[in-house]
Image (spheres, rainbow, N blue to C red):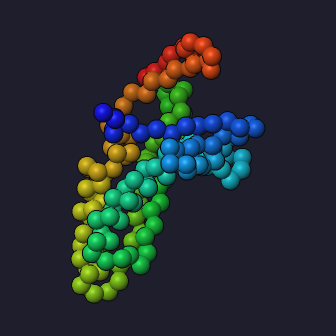
């Protein structure tokens, strides 16, 4: 039986550049912020926003197709008292408009509930960030045993 709960991406370094790939063949370049490539922090913000945007769109667009739908995710990268980097003040802001009429009114009425449901129950990304979960790390030689382990 296959494990249908497993999700994964692969980060590959080629010619001094990194890219992320999924099992469906999609690819996103990753950088340090010196060029147009997304940084890991931007990808984290994008994951939070995209997860909740997809939830909210699925719930509201059943009632009416939005005339405008944008999500802005912000946060501050800080060094905490232990000297470790992390993000604080994470915020997701929706700018959504629906057409006039009964269907648009129904979608507008649904919007606050859809945002709340995504935040409280549906969005795996923001719920994982808020609840916290340990991250384990290992290193393996291509032709050899594990080099070491770390985790939090």
- Which sits in the foreground, 61 or 151? 61
- Which sits in the foreground, 2 or 94? 2
Which residue is farthest bottom? 101
- Say which residue appears at 34% left-offset and 45% top-offset: 124
Give the tally of numbered discs: 0
Asked whether residue 1 appears in the rendered view, the answer is: yes
Q: Is residue 115 left or right of residue 85?
A: left
- Say which residue appears at 26% left-offset and 50% top-offset: 120
Q: Position of residue 122 (x, y in %)?
A: 29, 51
- Image height check: is 70 above or below 45? below
- Which sits in the foreground, 129 or 7? 7
- Image height check: is 144 above or below 107? above
Where's the N terminus, which quadrant? top left
- Image height check: is 18 above or below 107? above
- Say which residue appears at 35% left-offset and 83% top-offset: 99
- Which sits in the foreground, 136 or 116? 136
Which residue is farthest front? 1
Q: Position of residue 33 (x, y in %)?
A: 67, 46
- Say which residue appears at 31% left-offset and 77% top-offset: 64
Q: Position of residue 62 (x, y in %)?
A: 28, 72
Asked whether residue 76 appears in the rendered view, the answer is: no
Q: Position of residue 81 (x, y in %)?
A: 49, 28
Q: Is residue 17 left or right of residue 80?
A: right
Where's the C terminus, which quadrant? top left
């Amino acid at each position: 039986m296959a494990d249908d709960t497993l999700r994964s991406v692969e980060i590959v370094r080629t010619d001094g550049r990194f890219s992320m790939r999924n099992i469906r063949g999609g690819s996103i370049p990753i950088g340090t912020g010196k060029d147009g490539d997304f940084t890991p922090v931007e990808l984290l913000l994008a994951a939070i926003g995209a997860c909740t945007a997809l939830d909210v769109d699925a719930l509201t667009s059943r009632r009416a197709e939005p005339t405008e739908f944008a999500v802005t995710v912000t946060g501050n990268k800080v060094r905490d008292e232990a000297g470790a980097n992390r993000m604080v003040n994470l915020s997701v802001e929706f700018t959504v408009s629906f057409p006039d009429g009964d269907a648009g009114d129904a979608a507008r009425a649904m919007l606050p509930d859809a945002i709340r449901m995504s935040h409280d129950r549906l969005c795996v990304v923001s719920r994982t960030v808020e609840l916290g979960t340990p991250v384990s790390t290992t290193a393996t030689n291509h032709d050899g045993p594990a080099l070491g382990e770390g985790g939090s």
